[in-house]
Amino acid sequence: MRFFGELGELVSVLYKQGHYFEIFPYSELVINQTVKGDMNFRIFESMMCGACLLTEEGGNGLTDLFTPGEHLLTYRRNDAADAATKITEALADTSRTRALARQGRDEVLRAHTSRHRAARILEILSTLEKKTLHMKRFCWATNFSVLSSRLRKLDSSYARQSLVYCLRVVESALQHGETLIDEVAMYVVHACCTYDRELQATAGMRLLDKLVEAYPNISIVKVAAVRAALNRGEYDRAERFARELSADIPQNTYRKVETAMTVLLKDVEERLAE
């Protein structure tokens, strides 16, 4: 507002808030000053309304779209004296000012309406290559796990349903041979364990069995599989996984597995609660 205050002391100028379309069509000149040298909507709004635009100079791409002296007028940024001089000159030669206004409006209609912008966006999008996301379903599973946690305090039935969808999506990810990484595996393991606890079921454990066979290099999954095997009394299976995890004796590995699972599940719970 400082700029307009200084400008108002040099020339008669109207500045106010309100609907631009109630003022711009009846104006000889519209004066534009940006916040940070940006290409704001006022540039296009004023020209489209048929007013001659007086806007600040700047390296914001303005001259890539319009030509000063042909489509609009410019002044030095924050220079009220320069702007006042340009205003006085423009109002002294209204025929030239109105010609600039017509040329500016014609240029906006020719290349700078919302239809032109939409067409340009579609043109750019059409050149993009579709990328294959190699863990799309596992990411969906993570979302369902998060949703289940969010719903638990609101509606337990919907929370359980989200867990059901989570496990279904994990099954689908397995079938499609998707990539699994440790960060996502944490949520998948958490969902499997939570599913069995909440629904008094064993589907989560069975799914962990499939995961450990499909992703033998994901330690988080193998740790969960050891615990699941011990819970089912499948000690041979638990021992096999334990020896793959560590060269230590299985009994020591089992204690470490229990600690690791406690930490992992607590960590995921804390993340889900954020």
Image (cartoon, helix red, strand yellow):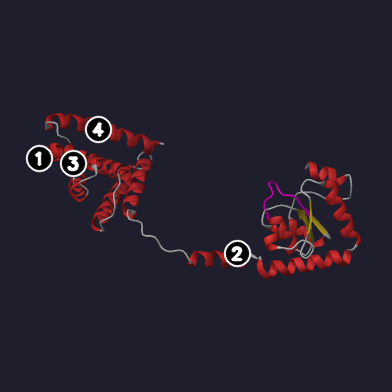
Question: Would you place residue 202 above or below residue 48 in this image?
Answer: above
**Secondary structure type for disc 2:** helix
Q: Say what amino acid the circle numbered 2 marks.
A: Arg
Q: Say what amino acid the circle numbered 3 marks.
A: Ala
The circle on residue 115 is none
Q: Residue at x 28, y 31 (%)?
A: 263
Query: Residue 66, percent across and down?
Result: 71, 63
Q: Is residue 156 left or right of residue 104?
A: left
Q: Say what amino acid the circle numbered 1 marks.
A: Glu
Out of 246 and 274, give the one closest to the viewer. 246
C-beta proximity under 8 Å, tags 2 and 1: no
Magenta span: chief secondary structure: loop
**124 magenta-colored:** no
Determine which residue is flagged by label 4. 260
C-beta proximity under 8 Å, tags 1 and 3: no
User: Which of the 4 image quarters holds residue 5?
Assistant: top right
- The magenta-colored residue range is 31-40
The alpha-carbon separation of the residues under discs 4 and 1 comes to 20 Å
